[in-house]
Amino acid sequence: MLSVVIPIRNGTAFIQQTTEAVLLFLESYGSPAEGELIFVSDGCTDQPEVELKSRLEKDSRVRLERLGQPCGKGAAVRRGVLAARGDRVAYLDVDLSARPEMLVRLLAALDHGTDFACGSRHHVASRITVSQGLARVGLGWLFRRLVRAATGLEMSDTQCGCKAFLRQPMLPIFEQMKEPGFAFDIELLLEARHRKLVIEEIPIDWADGVSSSVKPVRDGIQMLSALIRLANRDRARNPDGGNESADEL
């Protein structure tokens, strides 16, 4: 069974089309009765429960989890993963910058021995149909290099909002996860590497959406602070060279 988790922060405008797209994918991926879609309200003030009311009443595959106040994307994804029932779990952005069909590639990697499949916008085989603005592209380029230098993670894109994993080996990581904000992906990857899980980057098609809640300056400072904290913690528990990458990276 596949569980798809989608964190939302005042993204009600996307809910109907996103629900239809994900449910259609779940029906094509498995039997119509299999799979679930879990929205997680990150302290939303635009009442996603109202928009989802009919779905929640009529379709047991659609669920809504709530955080009482805005806590961050990481906290919302964690809440959804802990509530998931599937043996495979994926998470996507509410505007579907990566369409649900991209999960086919990630799930195929899980079929062939990968524990944590990560969509990448910067893989040589990826296709970007709508790019981010120049400022975000430049900041993203800089942040990727800082991540690699600080952690040794040999990945082209740690922050992509399109990932899938086997629940059993990854659940203990989510249970202990501490980063509530956008840096949570780095924490997951460092913990997965520490546990010697198999990590693989997968090329995807991506169209940058209009719903991003990222504030480049504010969130950039917070992510840099989190990166330093995570890198120091990783080095402290691996003083003899814990930044060696898994074979797949």
Image: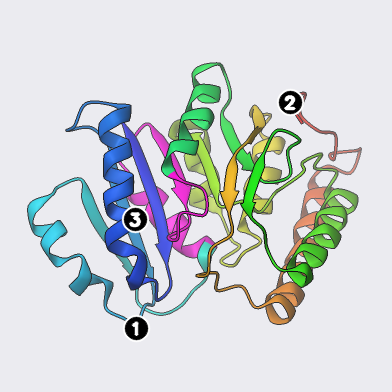
Residue 118 image offset from top left, x and y in percent: 61, 39
Tell whether 115 sits left or right of 50.
right
Q: Distance between the residues labelled 1 and 3?
A: 19 Å
The residue type indicated by label 2 comes to Glu
Q: Which of 248 and 96 is in front in this view?
A: 96
Q: Earlier in the sequence, mark 1 or mark 2?
A: 1
Residue assigned mark 2: 248
Whole-angstrom CA distance, mark 2 to mark 3, is: 32 Å
What type is the residue that disc 1 sits on? Thr
Task: Provide the residue span drawn in magenta.
Answer: 74-99
Quadrant (top left/top right/bottom left/bottom right) for the N terminus: top left
Select label 1 or label 3 by which is in front.
Answer: 3
In this picture, residue 63 sits left or right of residue 186: left
Residue that mark 1 sits on: 45
Instruction: Report the residue marked by disc 3.
Output: 18
Can you say which quadrant of the picture contains the C terminus? top right
Badge 2 marks a residue whose secondary structure is: loop
Q: How crowded is mark 2: few (under 14 residues within 10 Å), some or many (20 or more)?
A: few
Give above or below for 165 relative to 74: above
Magenta run includes residue 34: no
Residue 196, horizontal then vertical, whole percent: 68, 29
Cα distance in 3D space between marks 1 and 2: 41 Å
Assess whether residue 82 is covered by the magenta stretch.
Answer: yes
